[in-house]
């Protein structure tokens, strides 16, 4: 007995220490004891007020002085070069991280003051990298709410331009999805994650460069459909393609974590050097002018 | 066919499906290499047991000696013969020491056999992993594969180590004890045998029950692991969609089952000892009473009673042991079965014996009537024909899901064509060794892949012998040098396993630096710049052009601006080439491509 214990005891204590390490790690994002209510007549407002941010353990600010308001019924686009902080900005909205300076208000209240669950219910989030879970197409689209009706699921798939390829599959919505979504193409993965976000019928929809794997045709059809079906919602789009954001009500131009422009396509073409360069890199002169009117 | 236990409660493959076959395989493929060592184990286990078993008998002799001495003294005799007692005790000590040494040798040998064996199995599995076709991974989750590598091998090694030793010891002990008991008193032996059937029944019930729960425990352990793994990987989605509760609920469900089955199996096996003890004690009382009676009658010496009682006490233990070991064996064989199943999975077609010299390959690529489907009966690529001359820049375009990435996977032989052939400089790609083939290609895939490690190692991945200067040159060409410089440790900064600490575009730039450094014969870029902003894209264009100069390259891109200057554009739809030609030719055709190309300007009218 003693001999067995002498082997087991040190083992157990090593394990216990490791378990403790995990358990004692404090969740850095917590709900407050007393939470506030969303302001009803500010529904759908996303307000960045002089927000700055640095990643935990990093010593430089990734975002500085971000200040804009996205309103319901409008599309706010974010554009900027690789690594300029676009994903970081949108990741703050569902409170994956807490801002380190300034304030972020959603529906009129600071995101730190509301229960995370309530907050995230209002947001449909499409990440830059399509992540699917093993299961079926249905279980993935219904991920946000397993009890949703089939009609709602189908409608979301329809807007996301996914119906076409789903219906071509033998088992349709019951088709299996392998771990990580490895058995669908890049663009199909993206459309399924868009459908997943639309399916919960959120008031704020965030697309983080979510059209990059789509061909232009599907891309434009999708956005056309989106515009029709999501009237009155707040849309925030991170994009690389000028054509995607041409008609946005407001475009935020980021450079190295700072806002260097804010306005519509025409305004920015006139007064934002950064934006003009991006536009010129994509469209020829004629195309630029053709697109602007 | 129900298993050897005759029960079939529908529990999934935790119970070996074919105990005999798997055991044979285990012995033939692995254990037989350690024949000698196992022989040593058996001999020393038997030896150790024998020396251990005669102990009580000798001790009994000492007791008898002392008893006789005292009785003799009382009746005026010589008293205790201490010399004799001492010599008996020394013999005994000697026996125990020998037994301990034997047992040590036996344990040492067995442990090293078990460890070597599992080492070999792990190696086999690792080798196997590299030989499995991609198809296999489409159907299995990482969790399932991992469970084989960790859980099953662990069970195998531990149970192998313990059960072989224990079963030999237990069987020897039982036989030895019976012999010793018979040699002392046949009557008493018969009495102590009365309890045997009772013990046997109890053991059978408990083992049967606990075995069931043990199997369930293993099964749910797998579920729990799988869930944790997937949720960990997709935690942003879990959070964003308030999936925490559902995830926790699912987890709790599985965990609850795990708890229940774990508790029951442990409780039941824990029950065994006290129960057996109790029965043993009942037998012990019976034997003592009969023994005392026989001693009074003078039919047996006091020392012999003592020895007999000791043997009797030890008797129940090996029986329990055999029962437990049989459970362990079952679990072990079940684990071995899954391991073997994995090892016997159909492998990708073997590499040819003779390899083709790739140093002179120029880069002519031909697709000849290629037909392919991920499932044999669901064809995705119908009839793909194209001829690519060395140094050409080929673009593959088409709507999403058209099969573009699939063509790349075929070219790299991640999958094999159903029919038709892909030729490089006239050689079927099946005639190359896979490693050679893949070394010829440099690729940036749609799913950027970086591993947990330093930035430098990641860039160097395709050419491990590259110097630091070369790495920096490549990074500069890919326009990531500046970014890397801003990282706290520069080129030695560590990317985490999911490389979530760099932006998506930065990830792509790093993989581009990697191909630039690797300097391959044929280049494949699948949406290589989809997350890179267009200005940076233009900046790295010259590096890309340089890279593609004189090199056959395949480019897949939705941003048609990047492929305008391709020598040949293959337009795919639903797995077929619907058009081919240069940008100008295709635009003039006013067909599918022109439609696709112009669609990026339709938006404005639509919106
Ligand atoms: N591992 C797989 N198992 C089964 N089907 C698959 C697998 N991978 C892809 N498919 C299917 O094959 C078809 C072609 O996929 P492929 O990835 O080649 O498309 P693609 O042209 O690269 O599209 P995209 O532009 O979206 O990346 C799709 O319908 C997809 O769902
Ligand atoms: N978890 C992290 N820890 C530390 N730094 C990070 C982390 N995630 C991102 N960064 C850094 O923050 C900066 C902004 O990253 P972000 O992902 O927001 O860029 P982005 O604008 O979305 O770029 P892309 O267009 O490539 O997606 C980058 O320099 C990146 O390396
Ligand atoms: Mg990003
Ligand atoms: Mg693809």
Image (cartoon, coloured by chain):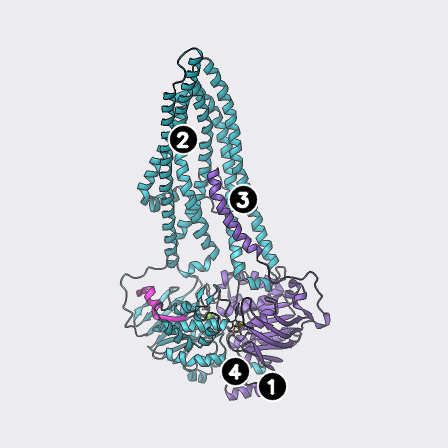
Q: Is residue B70 above or below residue B571?
A: above
Dot 4 and dot 2 within a common chain: no
Position of residue B507 measured from the top left corner of the image (x, y, whole percent) = 47, 71
Chain shaded cyan = B
Q: Position of residue B569 (x, y in %)?
A: 41, 78
Q: Which residue is mark 2?
A: B173
Labels 3 and 2 touching (C-beta < 8 A): no
- Residue B163: in sight, yes or no? yes
Secondary structure state at the residue bearing disc 1? helix
**Mark 3, other Cα within 10 Å: few <14 / some 14–19 / many ≥20:** many
The answer to whether tags 3 and 2 share a subunit is yes
Residue B421 at least partly seen: no
Which residue is under mark 4? A278
Q: Quadrant of the N terminus of chain B?
A: top left
Say which of B443 and B470 sits in front.
B470
Which tag, 4 or 1, sits closer to the chain's start?
A: 1
Mark 2 surroundings: few (<14), some (14-19) or many (≥20) residues within 10 A:
many
Q: Secondary structure at mark 2?
A: helix
Q: Which residue is mark 1?
A: A267
Q: From the image, state whether disc 3 or disc 2 is nearer to you.
A: 2
């Amino acid at each position: 007995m003693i001999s067995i214990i002498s082997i087991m005891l040190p083992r157990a204590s090593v394990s216990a220490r490791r378990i403790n390490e995990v358990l004692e790690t404090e969740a850095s994002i917590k709900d407050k004891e007393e939470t506030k209510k969303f302001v009803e007549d500010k529904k759908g407002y996303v307000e960045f007020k002089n927000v700055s941010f640095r990643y935990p353990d990093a010593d430089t600010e990734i975002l500085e002085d971000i200040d804009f308001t996205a309103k319901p019924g409008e599309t706010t686009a974010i554009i900027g070069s690789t690594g300029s902080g676009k994903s970081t900005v949108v990741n703050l909205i569902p409170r994956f991280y807490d801002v380190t300076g300034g304030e972020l208000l959603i529906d009129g209240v600071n995101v730190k003051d509301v229960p995370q669950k309530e907050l995230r219910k209002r947001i449909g989030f499409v990440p830059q990298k399509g992540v699917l879970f093993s299961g079926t197409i249905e279980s993935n689209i219904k991920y946000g709410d397993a009890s949703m009706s089939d009609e709602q699921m189908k409608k979301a798939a329809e807007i996301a331009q996914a119906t076409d390829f789903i219906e071509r599959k033998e088992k349709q919505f019951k088709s299996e999805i392998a771990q990580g979504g490895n058995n669908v193409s890049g663009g199909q993965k993206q459309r399924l994650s868009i459908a997943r976000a639309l399916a919960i019928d959120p008031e704020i929809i965030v697309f983080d460069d979510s059209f990059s794997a789509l061909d232009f045709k599907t891309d434009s059809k999708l956005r056309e459909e989106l515009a029709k079906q999501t009237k009155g919602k707040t849309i925030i789009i991170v994009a690389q393609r000028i054509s995607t954001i041409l008609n946005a009500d407001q475009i935020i131009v980021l450079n190295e974590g700072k806002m260097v422009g804010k306005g519509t396509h025409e305004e920015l073409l006139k007064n934002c050097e950064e934006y003009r360069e991006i536009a010129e890199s994509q469209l020829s002169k004629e195309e630029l002018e053709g697109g602007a009117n | 066919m129900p298993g050897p236990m005759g029960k079939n409660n529908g529990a999934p493959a935790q119970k070996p499906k074919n105990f005999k076959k798997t055991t044979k395989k285990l012995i033939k493929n692995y254990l037989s290499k350690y024949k000698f060592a196992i022989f040593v184990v058996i001999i020393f286990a038997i030896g150790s047991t024998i020396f251990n078993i005669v102990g009580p008998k000798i001790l009994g002799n000492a007791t008898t000696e002392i008893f006789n001495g005292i009785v003799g003294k009382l009746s005026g005799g010589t008293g205790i013969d201490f010399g004799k007692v001492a010599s008996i005790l020394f013999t005994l000590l000697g026996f125990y020491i020998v037994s301990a040494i034997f047992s040590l040798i036996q344990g040492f040998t067995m442990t090293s056999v078990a460890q070597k064996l599992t080492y070999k199995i792990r190696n086999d599995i690792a080798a196997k992993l590299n030989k499995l076709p991609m198809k296999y991974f489409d159907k299995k989750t990482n969790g399932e594969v991992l469970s084989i590598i960790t859980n099953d091998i662990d069970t195998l090694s531990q149970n192998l180590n313990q059960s072989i030793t224990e079963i030999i010891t237990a069987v020897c002990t039982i036989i030895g004890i019976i012999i010793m008991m018979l040699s002392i008193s046949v009557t008493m032996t018969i009495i102590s045998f009365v309890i045997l059937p009772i013990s046997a029944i109890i053991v059978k019930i408990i083992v049967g029950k606990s075995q069931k729960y043990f199997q369930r425990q293993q099964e749910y352990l797998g579920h729990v692991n799988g869930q944790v793994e997937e949720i960990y990987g997709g935690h942003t989605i879990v959070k964003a969609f308030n999936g925490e509760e559902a995830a926790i609920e699912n987890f709790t469900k599985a965990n609850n089952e795990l708890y229940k089955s774990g508790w029951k199996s442990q409780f039941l096996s824990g029950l065994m000892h006290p129960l057996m003890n109790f029965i043993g004690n009942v037998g012990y009382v019976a034997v003592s009473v009969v023994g005392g009676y026989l001693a009074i009658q003078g039919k047996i010496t006091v020392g012999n009673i003592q020895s007999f009682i000791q043997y009797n006490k030890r008797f129940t233990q090996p029986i329990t042991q055999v029962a437990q070991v049989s459970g362990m064996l079952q679990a072990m064989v079940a684990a071995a079965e899954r391991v073997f199943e994995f090892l016997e999975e159909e492998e990708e077609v073997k590499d040819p014996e003779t390899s083709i010299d790739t140093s002179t390959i120029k880069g002519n690529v031909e697709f000849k009537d290629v037909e392919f489907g991920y499932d044999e009966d669901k064809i995705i690529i119908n009839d793909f024909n194209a001829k690519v001359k060395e140094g050409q820049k080929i673009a593959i375009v088409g709507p999403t899901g058209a099969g573009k990435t699939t063509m790349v996977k075929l070219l790299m032989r991640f999958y094999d064509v159903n029919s038709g052939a892909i030729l490089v400089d006239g050689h079927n790609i099946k005639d190359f060794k896979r490693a050679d083939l893949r070394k010829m290609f440099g690729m940036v895939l749609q799913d950027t892949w970086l591993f947990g490690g330093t930035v430098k190692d990641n860039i160097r991945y395709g050419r491990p012998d590259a110097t630091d200067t070369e790495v920096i040159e490549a990074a500069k060409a890919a326009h990531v040098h500046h970014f890397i410089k801003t990282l706290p440790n520069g080129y030695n900064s560590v990317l985490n396993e999911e490389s979530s600490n760099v932006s998506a575009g930065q990830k792509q730039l790093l993989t581009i630096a990697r191909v630039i450094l690797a300097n391959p014969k044929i280049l494949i870029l699948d949406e290589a710049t989809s997350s890179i902003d267009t200005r940076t894209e233009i900046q790295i264009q010259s590096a890309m052009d340089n890279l593609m100069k004189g090199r056959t390259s395949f480019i897949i891109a939705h941003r048609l601006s990047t492929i305008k200057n391709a020598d040949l554009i293959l337009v795919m739809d639903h797995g077929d080439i619907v058009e081919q030609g240069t940008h100008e030719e295709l635009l003039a055709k006013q067909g599918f491509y022109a439609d696709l190309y112009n669609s990026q300007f339709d938006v404005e009218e639509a919106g």
